Amino acid sequence: MTDYQEYLDFLCTALESQNKNKLTLSEATTLVGDIGLSSLEVMEFIEKIEDHFDISIPLNILPDVNTIGELAQKVRELNF
Amino acid sequence: MLFDKFQAMADFQASLAEREVAPFGAVTEEILSATEGVVQGHKVLLAGTNNYLGLSYDPRCIKAARDAAQRWGTGTTGSRLANGSFAEHQALETEIAGFYGVDHAIVFSTGYAATMGMCSTLAGPGDVILMDGDSHASIYAGVKLSGAEVIRFKHSDPEDLAKRMRRLGDRANQALIIAEGIYSMLGDVAPLQEIAAVKREYGGYLLVDEAHSMGVLGDSGRGAAQAAGVEADVDFSVGTFSKSLGAIGGFCVSPHVELEAIRFCITAYIFTASSSPSVIASTRESLRIIGQEPQLREKLWDNANHLYDGLKSLGLPVGPTASPVVAVEMEDRSATIDCWKALMEAGVYVNLVVPPASPSTSFLLRNSVSAAHSSEQIDMIIAAYAGILEAGLINPPQAT
């Protein structure tokens, strides 16, 4: 199983193209509040993760995901 | 604060009021015919309804409604499970099941209740739903209520669906797949042959929402599954009476006898009053007309092709294929509102659609045609668009 840090690093790298405010991305960075992703951009980002790890991320988990770290943890659990 | 989240909407509505436009909830002050009305003081051609076959104003349907009101009163005042199941409701269930060639049907009070009710009830905790990403809000609401694991597949992408079914492993053969026939915003038809093939390969159950395709597609008007020749693969067809049938209400039909037990588990069916008998009676008459007058569908498609070809020839960014829904896709909100207002002033009412109701970040001028439109009326719609192009309100046009 890939370590949490590796998931986190992947997500931070993948988000750089949408990091319009040039924030330093970390596990505490929020997808909507800090990076400013729209709901559509969140879904497109989720699709990118799904294809990369060959997993499906249920919509049900999204209300519990605010930060990159929370998403990394969910992806890690789903890919276990 | 409780109300803070509504501020952005309040600001948007205020900005529309400043521009003296009210595209959302525009009040129709008078209906002159199936295709003409007075909206916000403008006598307009109605090109933004879902009255695909023009039956909302058919004298036979109006008579049926009037006679039923006389006989049964104005409302049932109760749920289908209490005092609200009249013989009319039962007859419509028999007739809609017969129309689809299956044995089981449920009639709901609205189309929203039908899709939301079925999607929230069929699958539950421990089950999996795979839904098209561009599904209607009623489907999203239903799956959220279901408690099932909800997985979204890319819009009308059977390969993506297949990939997700593969990932489910042994759970795939119990999954509920949800797709629509015609998607309401852009008018695109779902690739149901390919989606049904995925179901055949992996198993599962298929629910198709025919809200915008019933009466529009298929040899006898059953919808997109019939047109695609895959009705045998469809486990549940849901739809509405508020579009081609010109009334209000919804339905689910199925070959599965289990639908009779499911009926008693759907809160959107149980805890709401049943449709007024007049509504049911006009729906029954519309259903009879759809079955007997295929020329309505032919006229609808003639009009659809006419409008699509006309707007496309103007260079407007319309979708890849003709459909009774022809949407002009735009990128700028303010310009789209200006166009909507100009169309109204030119005597044409269309739908203004903004995200998240539109399937992307685009803004839409959504046009829909009816079998009741005359060829001259379709020309008027096209001329109104030519006018907004000449006025520079869409600049530059980008044909797709």
Image (cartoon, rainbow, N blue to C red):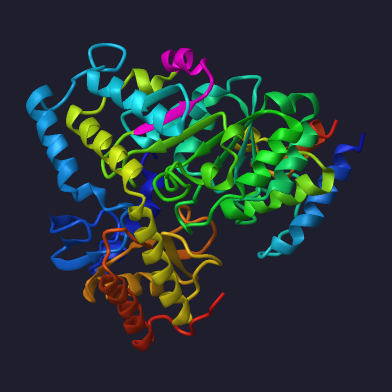
Q: Position of residue B383 (x, y in %)?
A: 31, 80
Q: Nearer the viewer, residue B289 or B188?
A: B289
Specify whether B315 is left or right of A41: left
The residue furthest right is A1
> Is B347 located above or below residue B72 in the figure?
below
Q: Quadrant of residue B240?
A: top left
Q: Nearer the viewer, residue B212 or A8?
A: B212
Q: Position of residue A1 (x, y in %)?
A: 92, 34
Which residues fall within the magenta stretch?
B250-265
Q: Position of residue B273 (x, y in %)?
A: 26, 22
Q: Quadrant of the C terminus of chain B?
A: bottom right
> Is B277 located above or below residue B335 in the figure?
above
Q: Position of residue B261 (x, y in %)?
A: 47, 12
> Is B41 located above or below residue B271 in the figure?
below
Q: Quadrant of the N terminus of chain B?
A: top left
Residue appearing at x 50%, y 64% in the figure: B362
Q: Is residue B216 magenta?
A: no
Specify whether B134 is left or right of B161: left
